Image (tube, rainbow, N blue to C red):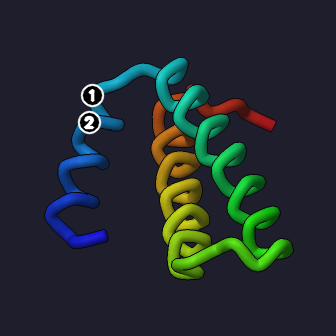
Amino acid sequence: MKHREIRKELEDFRKGDVGALNEELANLKKEQFNLRFQQATGQLEKSSRMRDGRRQGARTMKMQRGKTPQQKV
């Protein structure tokens, strides 16, 4: 992904709510699962999609942590 696309996507996440982030994270995990199967069967054409998916998942989780209230231990 290009930096402009990433910045725009992060701005959208910041404006959204926690429910939307949870839904996006679930979709990303499903996509990663499917990509792993494609790789195992030799059908994956662009292996960089796996890395992009992991990074996008990490960005989503970071936004999620920022939106949820912090608990004191």
Give the total number of marks visible in the rendering: 2
Query: 6 or 40, which is in the foreground?
Result: 40
Q: Mark 2 near mark 1, Cβ–Cβ under 8 Å?
A: yes
- Quadrant into which the C terminus falls: top right
3 vs 63, left or right, is: left
Q: Based on the displayed image, in which of its 4 quarters is residue 30 positioned? A: top right
Q: Can you name the residue that lies furthest to the left here?
A: 4
From what the image shows, is residue 68 above or below residue 49?
Answer: above
Q: Position of residue 38 (x, y in %)?
A: 74, 66
Helix, strand or loop at mark 2 = helix
Identify residue type, mark 2: Asp
From what the image shows, is residue 5 above or below residue 39?
Answer: above
Q: Residues within 10 Å of mark 1 (few under 14, many from 20)?
A: few
Q: Residue at x 57, y 27 (%)?
A: 23
- Quadrant into which the N terminus falls: bottom left
The residue that mark 1 highlights is: 15
Q: Based on the displayed image, in which of its 4 quarters is residue 36 positioned? A: bottom right
38 vs 22, left or right, is: right
Q: Based on the displayed image, in which of its 4 quarters is residue 19 positioned? A: top right
Q: Residue at x 48, y 23 (%)?
A: 20
Q: Residue at x 35, y 24 (%)?
A: 16
Determine which of the numbered discs, if any, sits on residue 48 in the image: none
Identify residue type, mark 1: Lys
Determine which of the numbered discs, if any, sits on residue 12 in the image: 2
